[in-house]
């Protein structure tokens, strides 16, 4: 479960980080990835772009079609590598709840 050296890295920009929430904008160039990580907090993702992300998970690859403005939530403990499967930049905002 190591990240691919051939892929560019997604760019996180922390917008808010306080004792209640952490809000991060993630920008992915085509084929960019987050690298493998495990979420330590429950979180909400708000896609700013419509497209498909590729999730590498311990159980295998999953394709996730996302629509701009249609949020989803996941619990703490999720482990994956998120990859932009589009030929264009993909952006989402992640809100982690402490």
Image: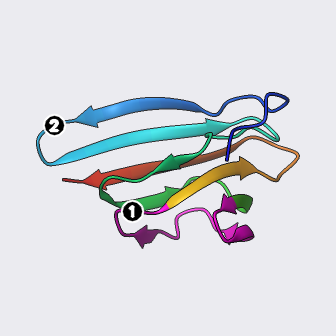
**Left or right of 45 on screen, residue 90:** right
Residue positioned 36% across, 60% down in the render? 43
> Quick one: SS at disc 1?
loop
User: 10 Å neighbourhood of mark 2: few (<14), some, or many (≥20)?
Assistant: few
Instruction: Where is residue 30? Give x, y as percent.
Output: 81, 40
75 part of magenta stretch: yes
In the image: residue 28, left or right of residue 19: right
Nearest to viewer (mark 2 / mark 1):
1
Q: In this view, does 97 lie above or below 31?
A: below
Q: In this view, does 7 lie to the left or right of 90?
A: right
Determine the residue positioned at 47% across, 39% down.
Answer: 25
Contact, mark 2 vs mark 1 (Cβ under 8 Å): no
Q: Which residue, given by chain and number where applicable, does mark 2 sit on?
A: 18
Q: Residue at x 41, y 69 (%)?
A: 74
| Residue sitting at x 39%, y 62% | 77
Task: Point out the stretch of residues depicted in magenta.
Answer: 56-78
Give whichever of discs 2 and 1 has the lower sequence position: 2
Q: Nearer the viewer, residue 41 or 84?
A: 41
Q: Is residue 14 left or right of residue 85?
A: left
| Rendered location of residue 86, percent (x, y) | 83, 51
Residue placed under numbered mark 1 in the picture: 77
Q: Nearer the viewer, residue 58 or 49?
A: 58
- Element under disc 2: loop
| Image position, residue 75 (x, y; %) | 36, 69
Question: Label 1: how many residues lie within 10 Å, few (<14), some (14-19) or many (20+)?
Answer: few
């Amino acid at each position: 479960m190591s990240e691919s050296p051939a892929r560019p890295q997604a760019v996180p920009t922390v917008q808010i980080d306080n004792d209640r929430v952490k809000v991060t904008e993630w920008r992915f160039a085509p084929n960019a990835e987050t690298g493998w990580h495990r979420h330590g907090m429950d979180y909400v993702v708000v896609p700013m772009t419509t497209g498909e992300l590729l999730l590498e998970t311990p159980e295998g690859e999953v394709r996730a079609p996302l629509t701009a403005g249609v949020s989803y939530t996941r619990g703490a403990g999720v482990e994956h590598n998120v990859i932009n499967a589009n030929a264009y930049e993909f952006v989402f905002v992640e809100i982690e709840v402490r």
